């Protein structure tokens, strides 16, 4: 997987466009002059968690004795489930979210909106494929995070300009792309497990 492919995969899993309404709802009761500061703080916390997990996740796999082929297939299944929820949202997974009574800290903006379980699982998958290329995977994490940070910093502006319908349409488009990627991951895992050409 190239740097661009890894960055694209991480960016799609982070789903910053789909997170805009979540961020806006969670920040409703935060003073307007503090919102950008809170977003910056939460994004930096999320980045720290992502970097730590990128390097610690491989050790976790060793403890659990999970093969690379199984992780590839499992990662594809997880991404497929996420993609299906993006393309076909249900009442439980719509963009409506209960606003917080106080200023959010770590939960839910850093975890799970930015550094969610699916993203952390994807990081483990990348690192397990080729640990020697850790610099490439780290660069992919940083680039994907940076792109997401720019979008989320402008979340208020984008929500006003695009509206909820356009955001939903973009999220479903990203979900369709993620379906293709996850399907390929599942096929690759099966192919490697059975030693198929």
Image (spheres, rainbow, N blue to C red):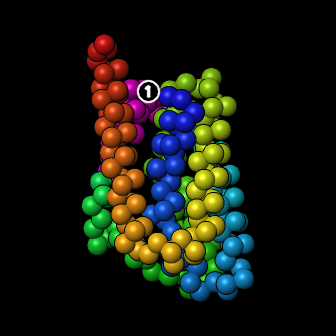
Residue for point 58% across, 48% down: 144
Location of residue 146 in the rendering, given as x and y in whole percent from the top left corner: 64, 52
Image quarter (top left, top right, bottom left or bottom right) of the C terminus: top left
Kindly identify which residue carries mark 1.
Answer: 68
For residue 135, side relative to residue 81 (left or right): right
Location of residue 14 in the rendering, given as x and y in whole percent from the top left corner: 50, 54
For residue 130, side relative to residue 18 (left or right): right
Query: Which SS type dominates the magenta stretch?
Result: helix
Task: Classify mark 1: residues with Cα within 10 Å, few (<14), some (14-19) or many (20+).
Answer: many
Location of residue 41 in the rendering, given as x and y in whole percent from the top left corner: 70, 66
Residue 112 in sight from this viewpoint: no
- Furthest toward the front, the residue is 161
164 or 96: nearer the eye?
A: 164
When asked about the image quadrant of residue 153, the answer is: bottom right
174 or 120: nearer the eye?
A: 174
Residue for point 72% across, 72% down: 37
Q: Could you tell me which secondary element the residue under label 1 belongs to?
A: helix
Residue 28 in sight from this viewpoint: yes
Residue 106 sits above or below residue 13 on the image: below
59 or 73: nearer the eye?
A: 73
Residue for point 57% across, 75% down: 156
Task: Identify the magenta region.
Answer: 63-82
Q: Is residue 148 magenta?
A: no
Q: How many marks?
A: 1
Location of residue 100 in the rendering, given as x and y in whole percent from the top left corner: 54, 81
């Amino acid at each position: 997987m190239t740097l661009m492919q890894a960055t694209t995969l991480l960016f799609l899993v982070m789903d910053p466009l789909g997170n805009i309404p979540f961020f806006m709802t969670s920040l409703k009761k935060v003073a307007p002059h503090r919102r950008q500061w809170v977003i910056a703080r939460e994004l930096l916390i999320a980045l720290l968690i992502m970097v730590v997990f990128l390097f610690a996740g491989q050790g976790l796999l060793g403890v659990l004795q999970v093969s690379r082929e199984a992780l590839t297939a499992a990662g594809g299944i997880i991404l497929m489930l996420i993609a299906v929820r993006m393309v076909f949202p249900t009442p439980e997974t719509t963009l409506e979210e209960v606003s917080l009574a106080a200023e959010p800290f770590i939960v839910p903006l850093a975890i799970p909106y930015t550094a969610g379980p699916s993203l952390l699982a994807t990081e483990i998958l990348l690192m397990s494929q080729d640990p020697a290329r850790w610099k490439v995977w780290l660069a992919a994490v940083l680039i994907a995070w940076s792109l997401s940070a720019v979008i989320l910093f402008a979340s208020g502006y984008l929500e006003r300009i695009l509206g909820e319908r356009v955001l939903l349409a973009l999220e479903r488009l990203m979900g369709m792309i993620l379906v293709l990627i996850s399907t390929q991951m599942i096929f690759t895992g099966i192919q490697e497990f059975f030693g198929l050409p």
